Image (spheres, rainbow, N blue to C red):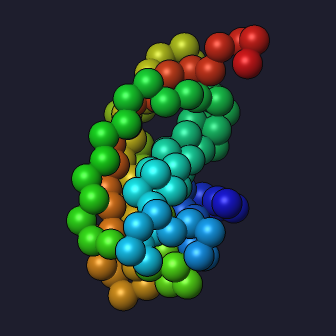
Amino acid sequence: MQFTVNGARVLGEFTPTELHVGFAGLVHGGILAAVLDDALAWLGYYHGQETVTARLAIRYRHPARPGHRLRVEAEELSGAGRGRMRQGRAVLRADDGTVIAEAEATMLPAPANV
């Protein structure tokens, strides 16, 4: 995925295909989780700090279908200086604004040897 920054928010778009289907023609929840997780990880990157996810809590609200564009928006809830954890929130929406899933995460600085 490609992400952009708008102020303090990370934005991205993703259009799932049939390759992303898990069950009954719906996009697999793990794919949706990966999109949310990736957007949250980029919060640190855009602040000059690579991070890894320590905790990710997801709330699935509506199903997503292949071929329908999704938009993700992530924001930092509590900032961090170098060497400290970051808290973030991300929302994944359909084009019509329907919330597909939401996530909150704790990200830690990436180890130096990664």
Q: Nearer the viewer, residue 62 or 49?
A: 62
Q: Is residue 80 above or below residue 59?
A: above
The location of residue 39, given as percent across then percent down, is 53, 51
Residue at horizontal 40 percent and vertical 57 percent from the top = 29
Instruction: Name the quadrant of the C terminus.
Output: top right
Q: Nearer the viewer, residue 43 or 96?
A: 96
Q: Is residue 82 left or right of 96 when viewed as pictured?
A: right
Residue at horizontal 62 percent and vertical 69 percent from the top = 19
Q: Is residue 3 left or right of 71 when viewed as pictured?
A: right
Q: Is residue 55 above or below residue 64?
A: above
Q: Is residue 60 left or right of 41 when viewed as pictured?
A: left
The location of residue 50, given as percent across then percent down, is 65, 30
Q: How many marks?
A: 0
Q: Is residue 69 visible?
A: no
Q: Nearer the viewer, residue 16 or 43?
A: 16
Q: Is residue 83 visible?
A: yes
Q: Is residue 53 above or below residue 15?
A: above
Instruction: Name the quadrant of the N terminus.
Output: bottom right
The location of residue 81, given as percent across then percent down, is 51, 21
Residue at horizontal 50 percent and vertical 84 percent from the top = 68
Residue at horizontal 25 percent and vertical 53 percent from the top = 59
The location of residue 63, given as percent across then percent down, is 33, 72
In the current view of this chain or complex, which residue is farthest to the bottom? 96
Q: Quadrant of residue 106?
A: top left
In the current view of this chain or complex, which residue is farthest to the right? 113
